[in-house]
Image (cartoon, helix red, strand yellow):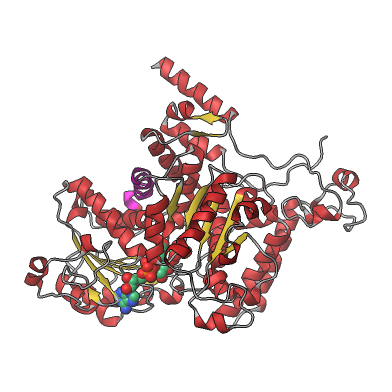
Amino acid sequence: MWRAARSAASTLRRTRRFSTAIPAPSIVHKRGADILHDPWFNKDTGFPMTERDRLGLRGLLPPRVISFEQQYERFMESFHSLEKNTEGQPDSVVSLAKWRILNRLHDRNETLYYRVLIDNIKDFAPIIYTPTVGLVCQNYSGLFRRPRGMYFSAKDKGEMMSMIFNWPSTQVDMIVLTDGSRILGLGDLGVQGIGIPIGKLDMYVAAAGINPQRVLPVMLDVGTNNQKLLEDPLYLGLRQPRLEGEEYLSIVDEFVEAVHARWPKAVVQFEDFQAKWAFETLDRYRKKFCMFNDDIQGTAGVALAGLLGTVRAQGRPLTDFANQKIVVVGAGSAGLGVLKMALQAVSRMAGPSADPHFFLLDKNGLITKHRKDIDPAALPFAKAHHEIEGLGLQEGAGLLEVVKKVKPHVLLGLSGVGGIFHEEVLRAMRESDSVRPAIFAMSNPTNNAECCPVDAFKLAGENIVFASGSPFENVDLGNGTIGHVNQANNMYLFPGIGLGALLSGARNISDTMLEAAAECLASYMSDEEIKRGILYPSINDIRDITAEVGAAVLRAAVAEDLAEGHGDVGARELQHMSKEESIEYVRSNMWYPVYGPLVHD
Ligand SMILES: NC(=O)c1ccc[n+]([C@@H]2O[C@H](COP(=O)([O-])OP(=O)(O)OC[C@H]3O[C@@H](n4cnc5c(N)ncnc54)[C@H](O)[C@@H]3O)[C@@H](O)[C@H]2O)c1
Ligand SMILES: O=C(O)C[C@H](O)C(=O)O
Ligand SMILES: [Mg+2]
């Protein structure tokens, strides 16, 4: 016992000593204006006199040195006055103005930017991430001032191996990659979709403490099928229809090879690819290197954690999940990802012969085995005739009919169609067989949500559990009661999945690692919170939940023998970490924004 404790303590000391967190730079090779124009080193008016003297900054700045705290206050004051000055203006104008002020800070002073982001994550996530990031993508060509990330286009075929060395950082840990073909629920936005990898990586820095010098947002521009963009003279992407088939895959292959030639251990997150390429690329690469598809796998884990929470909210044991009737609207990358993971969970609980009560609809209604040209990925969830004849349902049945006849415990939308849970559908949820029906309107951004929470609580009943993909305010139900709005967004998992994979040095990201992430999120909430309909932690706690998820993913990688270690911490040391030590190891590797000294004493 004593020996075990002592060995655990010494492992912890070793992990602390071998912490691979990169401290703020202690030396800089640049001088003068080059430092001021480098957002990583820039401290604006915060450079102390010694640094001004020794780095050739004297005379390039006003004489007074302003502290980090004062700079912070000054930025927040400007932000609040912008809020005041834009009061009453249309939401899109206000949101873009807020995005611009944050983006300017991002371009100028990364340390201050990430500190204000981390400290004000609840207010700023909706600007740099969903939903405003969607608006930014829609307007990207007009908003463009400075590039961020890398752009590989179909015209770069044969050049990518050398292009990758144009990226200035020597080390890259996290890459978020899109081809812009399905940006949130906004469709094909071509090169303008780069806003999504940028926003996701901002969340990586804020939530997972990934060092911002080691992230790389990437756009693979293979053309666009968005006619409006093709005709827009200001459009910044390739003006050609999207590549298809082998031509398309050869571009992705070339990029992936180039990345791994330079940074073999970088984790790659595929994001917002249209369903066919989302599934195909996941299949193609997931056993070959450390990658995952956030829309399929990250979303699935967040949804599963929420669904398990709804079982607890009904006062039922978790194993009752196998009996829940779940209607999923949307059979794309996200909807199918959720059902696949839910099926695995049911099989774990009730054995492989379990018969889950899932109903899947797409734009042509209820999917049954009679569907012509059925997507093979949807087949395991397609209903057989005998399963639905008793309910009076058939192939292609509409949403309202399905809800009325099935009386589901959960209605979950990942269709990208705003308002599809209309009044009658929501009213029909009153007849649900659950004492606490759940409505998940997970599509993004805000206007694409299947319904808004005010309507859901009003029409489906005040006892529901509600979640949406984009943020909404809680609903005041009167008499001091609050209808809690959960944000069922993959942001609760992807930072921890990426961080855990990175710090374990996982060869690839297995289903077990993803299940560990989902289970960790599911068990994070207390019974008392769950009873109040609160399924996910506050976004203010996102660093904490990400550390836990990251450690759970790391431990799963170790248990499966996929962990090769990271930096100075080898596979053997990872194997000897207790749960607490793994959490401490993950935490101690999170980057935190402070001004580091730029010259030696
Ligand atoms: N909350 C989250 O974390 C999260 C994660 C991933 C995706 N999403 C959102 O989910 C939505 C879908 O994403 P995806 O990647 O699955 O897209 P997708 O294009 O792959 O799939 C969309 C699916 O919706 C179906 N659909 C379209 N119109 C419909 C209708 N009227 N009725 C029923 N089904 C209909 C389509 O047939 C298709 O099966 C997007 O809005 C996206 O923003 C949210
Ligand atoms: O980006 C988000 O907010 C979640 C998700 O990845 C989506 O595609 O909608
Ligand atoms: Mg996405």
Q: Is residue 49 left or right of residue 328?
A: right
Viewer-closest of 559 and 239: 239
Viewer-closest of 537 and 42: 42
Indicate whether residue 386 is drawn in magenta: no
Indicate whether residue 525 is drawn in magenta: yes
Q: Quadrant of residue 104?
A: bottom right
Q: Is residue 275 above or below residue 288?
A: below
Q: Is residue 239 left or right of residue 342?
A: right
Q: Quadrant of the N terminus?
A: top left
Viewer-closest of 44 and 187: 187
Q: Is residue 64 above or below residue 519?
A: below
* Residue span colored magenta: 511-528
Residue 279 percent coordinates (x, y): 37, 59
Residue drawn at the location 53% of the way across and 30% of the way down: 569
Main SS of the magenta part reads helix
Residue 526 percent coordinates (x, y): 35, 48
Tell me if residue 1 can be seen: yes
Q: Quadrant of residue 77?
A: bottom right
The outermost residue toward the top is 3
Total marks drawn?
0
Residue drawn at the location 43% of the way across and 72% of the way down: 185
The outermost residue toward the right is 59
Residue drawn at the location 69% of the way across and 51% of the way down: 168
Tell me if residue 442 can be seen: no
Q: Quadrant of the C terminus?
A: top right
Residue 48 percent coordinates (x, y): 84, 47
Q: Is residue 416 left or right of residue 215?
A: left
- Quadrant of ligand 1: it is bottom left
Residue 136 percent coordinates (x, y): 58, 72
